Image (tube, grey):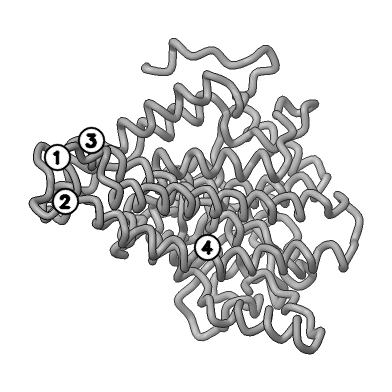
């Protein structure tokens, strides 16, 4: 494999600040570009194999479990860089890191056994959401887990199961009697069907299709108590989306530079025949570079707010501040991101709009990511907090 020339550090995990990680990202970026240029539904298997081999999914594990003990600033820095190389792959790992966080907090033998799988390179996808009558965040699911002769059987269908198509395991939310429960099981188990049927116009290769479960065997050690009813503020999965957008914005800036460098002729009404010396094009490049810088800085500032929340200790003040900061990032970053995706075309002629150039993918990807939670809801509650001191909703889906 391409990765055989890369060497992880002595602890066995991938150092996200090392030359090795830079080389891994370079391979992923080139593979992403190749798949985009060739068209069709080409999956990022090379990227996933490479990141599994280097145990990227283990970076947030503590050192005693073979991880890098990455802070949230570390995690989001890595996610932004990965999104710049391939936003689909960065998105695939979103649910994985959320499940790892849950397992680290669970502290039981089954969780420890699953974390050992992660340390070995396993990736965990998600099977949370359903197309049902229940409201998001209501902690009610049509998927059922039923007791049967000392074990369980799982039945149901999940939508938007991002990452599961490429994962080794998936985390499923289900109802056991009247209580929400979590199940983590292998995706290749009999009765599990993975469908790559996501038809969105952006983030096309994230595997965000449907996953169905038909009379699937589940052992006692694969069932975990759900934190749905007590989860409260959950800024990490929402901020992770903004991290992907920040990575895309960095790619927009570099694509603009590349676009100018590739042009063979200047604009008739331009300022100079040397496009790199054209003040107007320099101005656009400066804007795009600044937007990308601001986006990354905002995400990492909110990540530092999350790092201030003490592990294993409830501090509602710090938790609310982290959620508030993350919400502000969403409102601010999307305005800059949509502008950047449009301004990219100000440095190119009509050839930049060719489907083969695929530069419209940035807007489509940003729009898809931004649609996870409507921004007006975020803006309103921020304003209500500033005006009236009303706290943000303590709900993981907000």
In contact (CB < 8 Å): disc 2 and disc 1: yes
Q: Earlier in the sequence, mark 1 or mark 3?
A: 3
The residue mark sitting in front, 3 or 2, is 2
Residue 158 in sight: no
Q: Mark 2: which secondary structure?
A: loop
Q: Earlier in the sequence, mark 3 or mark 2?
A: 3
Residue occupying image coordinates x 61% and y 52%: 218
Quadrant for residue 89, please give it. Answer: top left
Q: Which mark is residue 270?
A: 2
Quadrant for residue 120, please give it. Answer: top right
Could you tell me residue 321's position as x and y percent? 79, 65
Could you tell me residue 238's position as x and y percent? 60, 62
Q: CA distance from mark 2 to mark 1?
A: 7 Å
Q: CA distance from mark 3 to mark 4?
A: 27 Å
Q: CA distance from mark 2 to mark 4?
A: 31 Å
Q: CA distance from mark 1 to mark 3?
A: 12 Å
In contact (CB < 8 Å): disc 2 and disc 4: no
* Residue that label 1 marks: 273
The residue mark sitting in front, 2 or 4, is 2
In contact (CB < 8 Å): disc 3 and disc 2: no
Q: Mark 3: which secondary structure?
A: helix
* Residue that label 3 marks: 261
Say left or right for 386 vs 357.
Answer: right
Q: Quadrant of the N terminus?
A: top left
Q: Nearer the viewer, residue 275 or 234?
A: 275
Q: Mark 4: which secondary structure?
A: helix
Q: CA distance from mark 3 to mark 2?
A: 15 Å
* Residue that label 4 marks: 333
Dot 3 alpha-carbon crowd within 10 angstroms: few under 14, some 14 to 19, many 20 or more? few
The residue mark sitting in front, 1 or 4, is 1
């Amino acid at each position: 494999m391409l990765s055989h020339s890369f060497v992880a550090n002595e602890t066995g995990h991938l150092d996200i600040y090392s030359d090795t990680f830079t080389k891994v990202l370079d391979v992923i970026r080139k593979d992403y570009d190749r798949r985009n240029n060739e068209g069709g539904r080409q999956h990022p298997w090379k990227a996933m194999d490479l990141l599994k081999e280097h145990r990227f999914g283990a970076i947030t594990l503590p050192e005693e479990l073979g991880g890098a003990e990455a802070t949230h600033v570390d995690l989001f820095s890595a996610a932004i860089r990965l999104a710049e190389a391939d936003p689909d792959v960065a998105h695939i790992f979103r649910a994985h890191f959320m499940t790892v966080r849950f397992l680290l907090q669970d502290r039981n033998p089954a969780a420890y056994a699953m974390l050992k799988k992660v340390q070995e390179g396993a990736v965990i996808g998600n099977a949370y959401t359903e197309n049902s009558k229940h409201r998001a965040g209501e902690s009610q699911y049509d998927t059922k887990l039923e007791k049967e002769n000392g074990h369980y059987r799982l039945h149901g269908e999940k939508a938007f199961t991002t990452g599961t198509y490429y994962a080794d395991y998936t985390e499923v939310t289900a109802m056991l009697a009247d209580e929400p429960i979590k199940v983590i099981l292998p995706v290749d188990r009999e009765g599990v069907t993975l469908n790559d049927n996501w038809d969105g116009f952006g983030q096309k290769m994230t595997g965000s299709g449907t996953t169905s479960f038909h009379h699937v065997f589940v052992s006692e050690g694969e069932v975990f108590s759900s934190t749905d009813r007590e989860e409260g503020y959950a800024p990490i999965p929402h901020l992770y989306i903004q991290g992907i957008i920040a990575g895309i914005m960095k790619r927009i800036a570099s694509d603009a530079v590349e676009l100018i460098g590739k042009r063979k002729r200047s604009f008739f009404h331009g300022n100079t025949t040397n496009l790199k010396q054209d003040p107007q094009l320099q101005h656009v490049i400066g804007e795009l570079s600044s937007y990308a810088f601001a986006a990354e800085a905002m995400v990492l500032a909110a990540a530092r707010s999350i790092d201030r929340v003490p592990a294993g200790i409830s501090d509602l003040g710090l938790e609310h501040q982290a959620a508030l900061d993350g919400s502000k990032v969403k409102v601010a970053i999307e305005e800059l991101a949509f502008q950047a995706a449009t301004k990219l075309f100000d440095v190119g002629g009509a050839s930049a709009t060719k489907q083969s150039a695929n530069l419209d993918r940035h807007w489509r990807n940003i729009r898809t990511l931004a649609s996870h939670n409507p921004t007006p809801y975020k803006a309103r509650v921020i304003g209500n907090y500033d005006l009236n001191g009303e706290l943000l909703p303590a709900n993981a889906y907000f």
